[in-house]
Amino acid sequence: MKIKDIFSAIADLFYPRLCLCCGTALTSSEKYICTSCVASIPRTNFHTGIRNLTEESFAGKAHANRAFSWFFFSHESPFSKLIYNFKYAGNYPLAQYLGEMYAKELYSDEIELKFDYIIPVPLHTKRKKERGYNQSYYIAKGIANVYGGEIKEDILQRKEKTESQTKKMRFDRWENIKDAFYVTAANTSDFDKEILIIDDVTTTGATIAACIIKLRESGYKNISVLTLAYTS
């Protein structure tokens, strides 16, 4: 056993690492979430061809070539702790870890995804400063580790700090976010690039629809979406 593994085992003995979902002690081979909880993730399986609620959330507003979400989100679910932990508790490495987990599952299911640019849904500068990071950027890093693609934060920008979407109804979310983004000077040679938009949770689809619309208005043609969670 390596020295670092010995120290890690001793640390786990006195300060056990706990599963973020169920609170049980993690083994040395587990990280953030135990094997049992990984198996119990409420997966949407939207990529298998069943009814795709993530795609439907954009209906009437915007069109994505492909759109998937990994698991169903509800505030009562123990899996909501994963979102809260990387979004509000500063645990941005968790966002990257989950992004990579999701990408590996898609890859193992033989979902062929190829992207030139991966665009995290941007935060307003003030909100990013308050949080210290953009969680969608780290999800994107996890996706890129599996599927490749260049993460681009200079294409899509947020022009104003909108009110939180959390407690807003569907129409109010759209009114709040529809003009919140803009695209920087676009290179016409990029218009045929495969674009992937990344966000943490799809609820009404308003935020992502606003991003898609601005990208398409600027000339980008091939746009897909991945989010970690879907909630209605």
Image: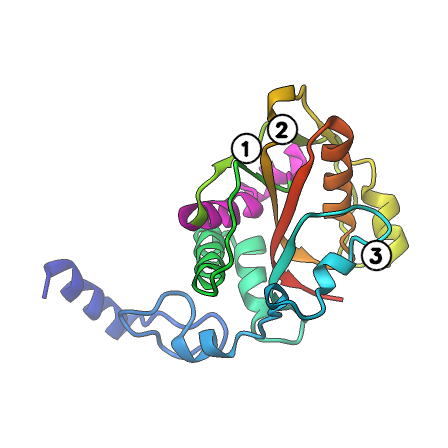
Provide the residue designation for mark 1: 152
Q: Secondary structure at mark 3?
A: loop
Vertical relation: 216 (above or below) 44 = above
User: Which sits earlier in the primary sequence, circle 2 or circle 3?
Assistant: 2
Q: In the rendering, at what x and y percent does residue 35 appear?
A: 39, 76
> Which residues make up the magenta segment?
122-146
Identify the mark at residue 124; answer none if there is no mark: none
Residue 54 placement: quadrant: bottom right
2 vs 3, front mark: 2
* Front position in the image: 166 or 72: 72
Q: Compute the Cα span from label 1 to label 3.
A: 29 Å
Q: Secondary structure at mark 1?
A: loop
The amino acid sitting under disc 1 is Lys
Q: Compute the Cα span from label 2 to label 3.
A: 27 Å
Q: Compute the Cα span from label 1 to label 2.
A: 6 Å
Query: Mark 3 Cα within 10 Å, few/some/many (few <14, many 20+)?
Result: few
Provide the residue designation for mark 2: 155
User: Which sits earlier in the primary sequence, circle 1 or circle 3?
Assistant: 1
Name the residue at 34% across, 74% down. Answer: 26
1 vs 3, front mark: 1
Residue 210 is left or right of residue 152, and the answer is right
Name the residue at 68% across, 36% down. Answer: 124
Q: State whether the magenta stretch is mostly helix, strand or loop.
A: helix
Vertical relation: 96 (above or below) 220 = below
Residue 209 is left or right of residue 194, and the answer is right
Provide the residue designation for mark 3: 168
Q: Secondary structure at mark 2?
A: loop
The amino acid sitting under disc 2 is Ile
Query: Mark 2 Cα within 10 Å, few/some/many (few <14, many 20+)?
Result: some
Label pair 1/2, CB-CB below 8 angstroms: yes
Quadrant location of the C terminus in the rendered image: bottom right
Q: In the rendering, at what x and y percent does residue 161 appear?
A: 75, 37
